Image: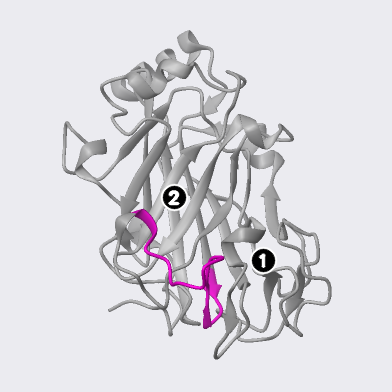
């Protein structure tokens, strides 16, 4: 009881509108089985019955303008699934947990020179991709005031989480010079396990822990249950949490974004170049990791 009271007093003194909790609580979810209820599908994305992660439907976007994807009528490179909820914005939790399933079509994702990606210094791979996995930040603010995820995949399961702010709009520019952020505004991570454009479903998870009084929050990302990590970003422990500026919150996030050059020489293989599907989105107050839903049966784990 004393610990709980102390935590509430800390939040009150800091003036943070966060809800301290003891048990994980589902805030909202979206599985696309009855249309779109807690998300938006933007710029040409569709609901499809093509190879869902579970159930009968999932959302699909085509990130490669000009590619032949008959499942998406109007391909747009900025097509995305975006989610937000008053359940998050009105009572922002002390620990926020996000989960969704994602699937890149089996295709050769290629840059302008036609070569496979060796993104982030990794080995070139026929399943590697290079595309932003959407923006994470405050509700209805411009994307320059949030962070973005970059999918790399490939044999080492590479991911980048980066500060998208510019001109001092979002964060004090000195945050990337602090001891707890040796990577600066780009945090390079890898799961050590392959994923990418092989047509298999994967599970993405993110946890943001705002507890404590330090000038950073603790964050962790998993793909297929494997933590995306680099020891440079967790100097005080081996728990694979990296650190982000204290004021960072995720009231809204999206799942995809691609620049035209990211896919400019990509080719269809078993699937369609630029095809991405999203399913089973859930957002929690508190982390349900210990009792998370069973991953899709064909998830790309080793």
CA gap between label 1 and label 2 equals 23 Å
| Residue 116 on the magenta segment | yes
Could you tell which of marks 1 and 2 lies nearer the N-terminus? Answer: 1
* Whether residue 131 is situated above or below residue 75 in the rendered picture: above
For the residue pair 217 and 172, the one nearer the viewer reads as: 172
Q: Quadrant of the C terminus?
A: bottom left
Q: In the current view of this chain or complex, which residue is farthest to the bottom?
A: 270
- Residue 293 position within the rendered picture, expressed as x and y whole percent measured from the top left: 44, 68
Q: Quadrant of residue 127?
A: bottom left
- Residue 19 position within the rendered picture, expressed as x and y whole percent measured from the top left: 52, 30
- Residue 188 position within the rendered picture, expressed as x and y whole percent measured from the top left: 35, 46
Q: Which residues are magenta?
A: 102-120
| Residue assigned mark 2 | 206
Q: Secondary structure at mark 1?
A: loop
Horizontal side of 277 relative to 226 (left or right) equals right
- Residue 92 position within the rendered picture, expressed as x and y whole percent measured from the top left: 57, 32
Q: Does the magenta stretch mainly form a helix, a strand or a loop?
A: loop
């Amino acid at each position: 009881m004393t610990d709980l009271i102390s935590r509430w007093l800390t939040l009150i003194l800091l003036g943070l509108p966060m809800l301290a909790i003891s048990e994980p609580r589902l805030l909202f979810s979206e599985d696309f089985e009855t249309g779109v209820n807690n998300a938006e599908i933007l710029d040409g994305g569709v609901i499809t019955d093509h190879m869902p992660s579970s159930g009968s439907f999932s959302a699909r976007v085509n990130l490669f303008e000009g590619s032949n994807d008959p499942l998406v009528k109007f391909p747009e490179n900025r097509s995305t699934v975006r989610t937000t909820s008053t359940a998050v914005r009105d009572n922002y939790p002390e620990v926020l947990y996000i989960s969704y399933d994602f699937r890149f079509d089996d295709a050769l994702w290629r840059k302008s020179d036609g070569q496979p990606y060796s993104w982030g210094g990794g080995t070139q791979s026929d399943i590697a991709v290079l595309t932003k996995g959407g923006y994470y930040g405050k509700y209805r603010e411009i994307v320059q005031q949030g962070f973005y995820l970059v999918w790399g995949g490939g044999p080492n399961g590479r991911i980048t989480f980066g500060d998208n702010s510019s001109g001092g709009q979002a964060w004090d520019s000195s945050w990337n010079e602090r001891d707890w952020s040796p990577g600066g505004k780009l945090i390079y991570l890898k799961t050590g396990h392959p994923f990418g454009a092989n047509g298999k479903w994967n599970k993405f998870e993110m946890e943001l822990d705002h507890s404590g009084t330090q000038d950073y929050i603790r964050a962790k990302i998993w793909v297929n249950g494997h933590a995306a990590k680099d020891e440079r970003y967790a100097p005080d422990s081996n728990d694979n949490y990296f650190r982000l500026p204290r004021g960072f919150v995720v009231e809204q996030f999206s799942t995809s974004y691609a620049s035209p050059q990211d896919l400019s020489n990509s080719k269809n293989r078993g699937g369609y170049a630029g095809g991405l599907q999203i399913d089973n989105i859930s957002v929690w107050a508190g982390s349900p990791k210990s009792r998370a839903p069973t991953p899709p049966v064909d998830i790309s784990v080793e």
